[in-house]
Amino acid sequence: LKNSVICLTGTPTHLYSADLDRTFMKWNNHDELCLSVVEDFSVWCSVVVDDFMYTGCSDSTIRKWTLDDQQVATFKGHEKLVRCLKFMDGYLYSGSYDGTIRKWDKNGECLATFTGHSDGIMCL
């Protein structure tokens, strides 16, 4: 399982994959070439919204990236690994192993925290 892919997301032109060996890769959808690799970066989930990608990370953060691989923001609030992300009705939702679901605006302001689960959130 060391090199198992744990998340995939994409756009019409690119595929993004993350695996357990702590690499995050960007691929060309048309010729299957790897275009970039970010190493020593543990991503557990990702979602593309408009011209940005959001990644849920093992360090309890959500990172916002341009589609040319530039990190532009870090969302902080969870206390454990961010396991799932979903964009819905203009908001980003995140689920974490801390047992909470958070609602964010696109700039990283946490607008709500949903509590009550006794264990980690695995899927939204």
Image: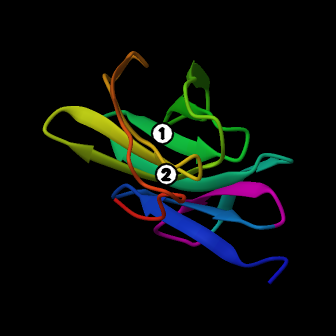
The amino acid at mark 1 is Tyr
Q: Position of residue 12 (x, y in %)?
A: 33, 58
Q: Quarter-wise, where is residue 80 in the image?
A: top right
Q: Residue furthest bottom?
A: 1
> Contact (CB < 8 A) between labels 1 and 2?
yes
Q: Where residue 66 sits in the image (x, y, percent)?
A: 50, 30
Secondary structure of residue under mark 1: strand
Looking at the rendering, the stretch of residues picked out in magenta corresponds to 21-32
Residue 99 or residue 28, whichever sits in front = 99
Q: Is residue 92 above or below residue 85?
A: above
Bin the neighbour count of mark 1 within 10 Å (Cα to Cα): few under 14, some 14-19, many 20 and up. many
Q: Is residue 11 above or below residue 66?
A: below
Query: Which residue is at 85% across, 77% downward?
Result: 2
Query: Residue 75: where, in percent of width, then height?
Result: 53, 24
Residue at the spot of label 2: 46
Label 1 or label 2, whichever comes before in sequence order: 2
Secondary structure beneath dot 2 equals: strand
Q: Which residue is mark 1?
A: 54
Q: Nearer the viewer, residue 37 or 54?
A: 54
